[in-house]
Image (cartoon, rainbow, N blue to C red):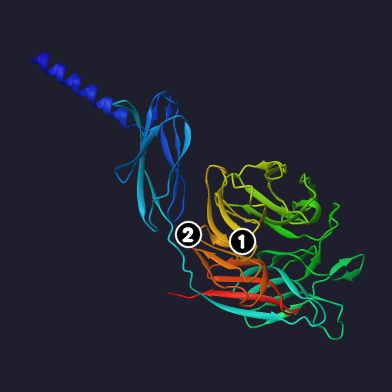
Amino acid sequence: MKKKIGIALALLVTLYFSCERLTQPRLGGGAFTLQEATTLVTESYLRLHAGQVVPGSTLRVYRNGEMLWQKPYTEADSIVYDSTLAPAHTYTYRAELWSGSRQLARSNAVTVTTLDTTSHDFEWEIIEFPSPYGSGALYDVAIINENDIWAVGEIYSDSNQTWLPYNAVHWDGEKWELKRIFYNHQSSNFIRPIPSVFAFNENDIWFGNFTHWNGSDFESIKLNVNFPSQAKKIWGTSSSDLYIIGFNGLIAHYDGNYWQRIESGTDIDLITISGNRNIQNPVIWISGVSESYKYGVVLQIEKNQRVVKLFGKGKNIFGIQNSHTHPDAVWLNDDFGFISYAGINDSWLVRHRISSYATHYKVLHVEPQGAIWSIKGNGPNDWFAVGSQDVVLHYNGISVKKYFSWPTWDIRYFSVDVKGDLVVACGIVFTSPNAAILIGRRRKK
């Protein structure tokens, strides 16, 4: 009897430790783990890691207890991608590794919640700024809050000084006011059109004529590097980590004390820049187009200020078809980059996963009405794209809403900014010399 009890006890101990080992997320000498990477409205990306690859093994992925799919397991580090989800739902995933009928390892469980869609329902208002003494245009816009908005460009409406442009307009919550922002050089004030504006807050705003608003004064910024053009676009994480781009491939970085030229490897005009501030490895993308608009580039600035080409002549890391000749606008958010590509007869809006360019890109919209020049938003489920011939588009995480058919106002929009339920785009009216601003306010449910 004692012998039988001993055998039974030994068997139970063996079973216990066998089950314990089985439930641990380990494979050989390393962990077998599942981790959420990014979750969107109908898609989720999860990172799967194993200490080793077992030849001939099969990976099974389960969602809410049911097997989603199985396939041969060939990579120790891989991405689990699920594109069959519903908005605003919660799902639990786990993975198992099998060799024939034997389970080798089981991962931890990971719970993800998809984003919800955002509303397409906006109320629109158009404001024109007369420019009777020259062709007016607003090239860039920055929203600080609903009562503090800046747009920059050139407006010729001063009858006493017809040659002297206003180069900015400002909204204070009650009215739009025309402004002149001077650049001071050797005790003389100079004024010319401003191509760009970038705001960190109401007391920290950068303008493309190398002028900075510090909350009380416009201060002229002296560059210690050769940057003969104005800043076509500005982007940064702070006033001590700021990038400017310009014509002929010009890039410069400001660390709060000094400017440093960055070699771009191209001489074409650089037109948009955007960066990612929300992940461990910051990424910065720049788009540029040739003067003839026949080809373009997408550049990436890496941590050591080295520039690599992602897309352009002889390079296409994205996997997008070459028939779409050049990228016009870039915008980065979290782990995704959004690019507009101009083709022969249409423009494409494409989402690229930053950490896996070619294998995870998705065409979100094809626009035949006109070129897309600017993309900006609150997140991957709430952003706008604007361009020529009244193109104003909103992506809500699943679908693209097109608001106007040409020629509703016959406006070419150069830039857009979005903050919460407020969107502002700026440009030029083709049927008059006037500059224009489009304001959209999302209707409350």
Question: Left or right: where does residue 381 sit relative to residue 67?
Answer: right
The foreground one among 213 and 216 is 213
The spot of residue 401 in percent (x, y) is 51, 67
Question: Left or right: where does residue 51 sit relative to residue 142?
Answer: left
Q: Residue at x 80, y 70 (%)?
A: 193
The foreground one among 368 and 410 is 368
- Any mark on residue 397, and which? 2
Badge 1 local density, few (<14 within 10 Å), some, or many (20+)?
many
Label whose residue precedes the other's in the sequence (2 or 1): 1
Residue extending farthest to the front is: 345
Residue extending farthest to the top is: 3
The foreground one among 231 and 436 is 436
- Spatial CA distance of label 2 from label 1 is 15 Å
- Any mark on residue 375, and which? 1
The spot of residue 443 in percent (x, y) is 48, 75
The amino acid pointed to by label 2 is Gly
Element type at marker 1? strand
The spot of residue 412 in percent (x, y) is 68, 70
